Amino acid sequence: MTTVDHPLVDAAGPGWVGTETRVPIIALTTATSDWLHKTATQGLRPIIVSGEHSRMTQPLAQVLSSVQGHWVVRARDDGFYDARTGVRLDAPADALTAGTPTPENVHPLFVRAQVASSLQVVATVSTRHRVTRPVRMGGVAEAAVALFTGAGPAAWGAVEPLLAPWDRDDLTERSRRRVPLDSHWTAVGGSERAVIATIQAARTSEGLEETTRVWAAVPGVGRDAGTAATAEARELLARAATVGLPLIGVAFAAIGAPDLARRATAAPHPEPLVLLIGPVGVRALGMDAKRWIDDVGGTTVGSPRLPSVLLPLGSVDGGGWTRLNEVLATVDPTRLAELLDLAPQVRAQLIAREGAR
């Protein structure tokens, strides 16, 4: 049996390596990043086991998912469960083969009520950069943090806690040096309003492609907060349309922890708020941007010469999934599949959330 020689390893079995922690916030620390890297490079799947009240930072959750890992919760009095699906497990390794959740197999702790929750704007944007032109990465993350906090990111880095002052040029140069390997970075705002962005840079045959994911807490409660979330989501994607060559982006309204960390409990399904189709995406769909807007509603944003299409969907109160399906139904399915293949992270957001309904 292949295993990994690392201080964080607490257990191992065929095809997997596990670590257990009791910290309240599970983060992508230097040690955790090293353990995940060594585990994945040996073709093994990592399993992180925590207590029932632990939360996981978004950067760690994203990296763990990218290496097909699992977060498993050890209940104090009643076995284990998968933190993503809630499926009850007899042992942590069962997460590798667990089936889909049903009313009968979901652990009761997964559906317990939360004491505090907040509205969030959650967005994913895929951007292309031509290597024949000067490239500066991190533009979408910088624009997002500025929108939500009124200032640029305060810090960035590859692991948590983030210690380096924000520097787009340094981020760009470090990403360039790592080619052909992918790069994963995180940036955070410096205000009281919680905002976090992750940046993935990958080399493709078309140039550098950058995927930015953003989570931002929305202050206030009730209808005013919902209205603000919808307006900010649209403004975020409008600003993203001015960075590089946007492929596609989508923004949701979600409910989660005030500090933006992931909980090991069920959450309401996010509601789509707005969809961005960049000029590359419009061309891939074989659409005339202005004619399409006349048919389905929306506005053009970004470059007047190479416009992007911004399509309002629903609101915090709902309607977004229906509207999204109606919009996508006007597109040739083969061309749509090709576009989503260019932006796999956005595709995953649309498929995962639609499939969970």
Image (cartoon, rainbow, N blue to C red):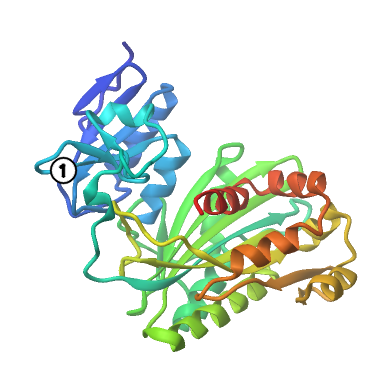
Q: Name the outermost residue toward the front.
A: 104
Is 202 placed left or right of 13 in the picture? right
> Callout 1: few (<14), some (14-19), or many (20+) C-alpha neighbours within 10 Å?
some
Relative to 215, 53 lies left or right = left
> Looking at the image, which is closer to me, 294 or 199?
294
Front one among 203 and 294: 294
Q: Position of residue 235 (x, y in %)?
A: 61, 79
Residue 245 can be seen, yes or no = no
Q: Is residue 108 visible?
A: yes
Question: In front: 315, or 203?
Answer: 315
Q: Residue furthest bottom?
A: 224
What's the residue type where badge 1 is placed? Ala
Residue lying at the far left of the rendered structure: 77
* Horizontal and vertical percent position of residue 78: 14, 39
Q: Which residue is mark 1?
A: 75
Seen in the picture, residue 143 relative to 150 is either above or below; the reply is above
x and y percentages locating residue 250 in the rendered image:
61, 63
Q: Where residue 327 sits: x, y (%)?
A: 74, 63
Residue name at image x 55 percent, y 58 percent: 212
User: Seen in the image, is 285 located left or right of residue 1?
Assistant: right
Residue at 34%, 59% in the rendered image: 162
Q: Is residue 336 above or below residue 282?
A: above
- Which image quarter holds the N terminus? top left
